[in-house]
Amino acid sequence: MRDTEEIHKLKKNIFSADWEGKKASANRLFEIGGQENTDYLISLLDQSNSQVRDAVALTFRERKFNEALDPLLKAIVKKENSGYNGTMVYALETLDCSHKLKDLFEILFEKNSYEAQNHILTILNEQTFEFSSSDLLTIKAKWDALKERWNVLNNIEGENLRKHDIDKDLIQSFVDSYTSYFDKK
């Protein structure tokens, strides 16, 4: 009975205005465990409140909870979350994205914040991936269609690159690092 009261209180606190309280409640629900609690936390990735999504995403990141990979990817690409998905992308860094190369590039290619793009590049740089020739062809085709507009779409001005700009040349280097597997066959 006591666990039920605590769980009810934690679920309520996730929606409070207190950021630290949100994070602590999400963490505690995860610690209590059980499929019902993890399913509940996963369902919160569909919330319109970005702080709720972020608190849950950080819990999944800390716990390296790979069952949240697909729900996180789904939440990241929702149009209504555009511009408010950086923390969810950050959470992917500790999850096994080895079979999600194409998904990661698709997120990178969408108009996302610097924060989200930077986290995707970190994942692409640090993890090892399994992919098909078809995946690489899709990535290359999408990049080829986008690359000439990349800097304009990302508000990068000509030769005056700022230290934090993720410009066309940087993205090209990541695309090339994967499509170079064609050359090795």
Image: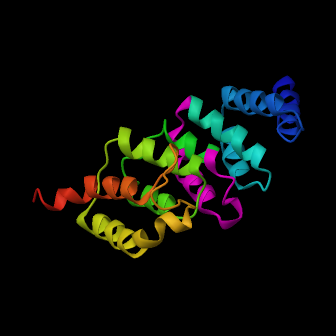
The type of colouring in the image is rainbow
Residue 182: percent from left, percent from top = 16, 62
Q: Which SS does the magenta portion mostly show?
A: helix
In terms of image quadrants, where is residue 11? top right
The C terminus: image quadrant: bottom left
Residue 110: percent from left, percent from top = 53, 64
- Residue 147 is inside the magenta segment: no
Residue 91: percent from left, percent from top = 57, 40
Farthest residue toward the bottom? 145
The N terminus: image quadrant: top right
Answer left or right for 88 relative to 96: right
In the image, residue 144 above or below residue 96? below
In the image, residue 36 above or below residue 177? above
User: In the image shown, does 118 or 70 lie closer to the viewer?
Assistant: 118
Q: What residue is drawn where x is 44% and y is 41%?
A: 122
- Residue 80 is inside the magenta segment: yes
In terms of image quadrants, where is residue 4? top right
Q: What residue is drawn where x is 56% and y is 47%?
A: 89
Q: Read off the magenta span.
A: 63-86
Q: What residue is drawn where x is 52% and y is 33%?
A: 64
Number of callouts in the render?
Answer: 0
Q: What residue is drawn where x is 34% and y is 53%?
A: 174
In the image, residue 103 above or below residue 8? below
Answer left or right for 152 relative to 44: left
In the image, residue 150 above or below residue 87? below
Residue 118: percent from left, percent from top = 51, 46
Farthest residue toward the left? 185
